[in-house]
Amino acid sequence: MAFIHHNSDNGAEDAQLIRIYKQSGKLEDLANLYQRYMNLVYGVCLRYFDEEASKDAVMQIFEELIVKLQHHEVQNFKSWLHVLTRNHCLMKLRAMKNKESREVSLDGLPVMENEQFTHHDGGNALETNLQEMERCMETLPEEQKRSVDLFYLKEKSYKEVADLTGYEMKKVKSYIQNGKRNLKNCMEQQNAAAKQSY
Amino acid sequence: MQQQNNHIKPLADPELIRRYLAGELDSKAMHALERQALDDPFLAEALDGFEMHAPDQRINLADLSKRLAQRVQPAPKRVIPMYLRWAAAAAVCLAIGSSVIWLWPARNQSEIAKVTVKTDTIIPGEVAGLVQVPETMTTFRKQQNNADTKSYRAPVVPPPALAPAPQPQAEVAAAEPAPAATFDVGKASRLAADDNKDTADVIASQNLYKNNNFNPSDVSVTSLYSKRVTSPSGFDPYMIKGRILNTKGDSGIAGVTVSMGAVGTITDNEGYFSLPNDNMGVIPRMKKMSSNRNEYKQVTAYASGYQSSSTTFKGDPFIRMQLRRTTDTSTTALSSNNEPVPVGGFEKFEIYLAKNVQYPAGLTVSGKVRVQFHVAPDGSLTDFRVLKKLQPECDQEAIRLIKAGPAWMPAANGKAVKVKVDVRFTPEAHQ
């Protein structure tokens, strides 16, 4: 798939930019790297703060990067930056929680599963094993099956899926996410079973 | 979107995201992005975040790019104005210096002010009587630091300088390198006085420490300044010059951030600084001194490893401030390295607190509320927490008061710094 291929390229480019920065120690070089992800960092911050505070957070994360990148050996910069961003926001929120003027509930925020990071490029396996997948599809709950089918196989957007099925947008999203995870689990089990039978 | 480098583009096109959220994409493109998000938790979370706000974030993203660019290249912007300020300062000092040199022989002949000036020695106490130091000037100093009436130093008597300096003489001083001229000229006029002065500083500062038995609510500010009354003709009213010294007064501190209002600068290797002063000049200086005190600006100096210090600028041609090392002190309740400073200085801040505190109705308790908060690198105040509670109403009022109060200058190291402030509540004072 085009975008997956794209990803690995970017990974190499990131690594190169990190190398350049580490050698030169110049902030411009780091900024070049950071700019590639700045809007994502900003977007993540927007989940937790308002626009102004988010912008500040983006700049603070940059400051953190200046130091951390020099000391840490970063393999997958994108995932690493994501975790860094998220941690920064959560730390800030936690600090804010004690403050009476602003109540932010941490409970409402979905917790990220580590699994999602480790299977970053797991999409490949999904697409090469269509047959197995179809078998697994049958094991999914009806809503997940319909949503996944429409989204992945019929290539409909969330909105279209929602229109076609009558489910809520938010539900559609979670059906697809959960369906995808269930599918992956199912296929891993099948793979393991296949290996044992050899 | 403005991008610094053409070949380095954000991986997730902000424009695509914007159009996605605004519903401007066709379903195929929507699907592609959604699918990408499923494989990319970073993008997915960012999309969630964007969804919670207005779809058009272009202004904010552009602003961020600008801020990043500024953060990355702050150097050239600062260097040029600094250089110009120094050049201006050097020019002013040359003018002062030349007038002093020109007046040197003339002074012995004509005892204009009938002052028996031997060499420019310090004559504490008597000075005010002998020379026409405006009365207001002295009283100001007394009000200034309630604790340091002892440490307050008598002005150094200048030669009774009266005539404008002729230009040719300037060349004598011009042989000296420019920054050195800034102080050498000042010193040259009172060579004999200098030894005395330094010892005076030491004594004065010691007194100051004794007197300031720091109440945790008080801000540990030590400021000591010497006023040098120079002839108004040689003084540039648009520049404020001064030097930041260590507590002994024997060496300057480099890299101290000195600010007055919105303008700021950093001291050079010898601790000297000069600041543009937009406030003065319109009104004659002496007149100004007798007018409302609130018009004077607070000059604040802070540096990493030192306690910050502030003093009120009253038209002094030369401000001298001494910074105490944070390790010198046992009172660390309020000060730490790189501490933030309220705009206008701590003194004014204390006054603000005392004046504006509203005692909640129906209560009789008295005492203090200690509030802790963070001064974020952008100067915003966050994470308010009450460390010492009194009554819930008082706690609320203390936080309100600080939030509504003067803005804070963030710490020099670009980090959020914890600050603790005490707000006093006394029922009698707020009937």
Image (spheres, rainbow, N blue to C red):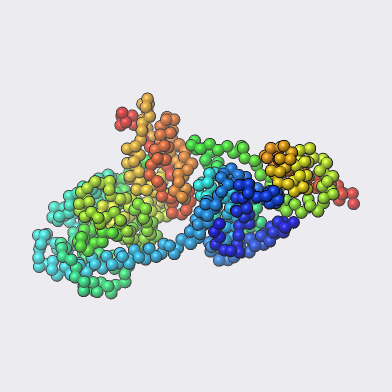
From this viewpoint, is residue B325 visible?
Answer: no
Q: Residue at x 48, y 41 (%)?
A: B383
Q: Residue furthest top?
A: B362
Left or right of residue B31: residue B69 = left
Position of the N terminus of chain A, as image quadrant, is: bottom right
Decide which of B363, B251 is in the foreground and name it: B363
Number of marks in picture: 0
Q: Residue at x 84, y 48 (%)?
A: A132
Q: Against B174, is B221 above or below?
A: above
Instruction: Give the image quarter of residue B197.
Output: bottom left
Q: Residue at x 24, y 74 (%)?
A: B171
Q: Residue at x 24, y 49 (%)?
A: B141
Q: Against B422, is B17 above or below?
A: below
From this viewpoint, is residue B108 visible?
Answer: yes
Left or right of residue A35: residue B314 = left
Q: Position of residue B291 (x, y in %)?
A: 22, 47
Q: Residue furthest right?
A: A198
Q: Position of residue B14 (x, y in %)?
A: 60, 53
Decide which of B281, B13 is in the foreground and name it: B13
Left or right of residue B139: residue B9 = right
Left or right of residue A55: residue B114 = left
Q: Position of residue A121 (x, y in %)?
A: 73, 53
Q: Position of residue B394 (x, y in %)?
A: 40, 32
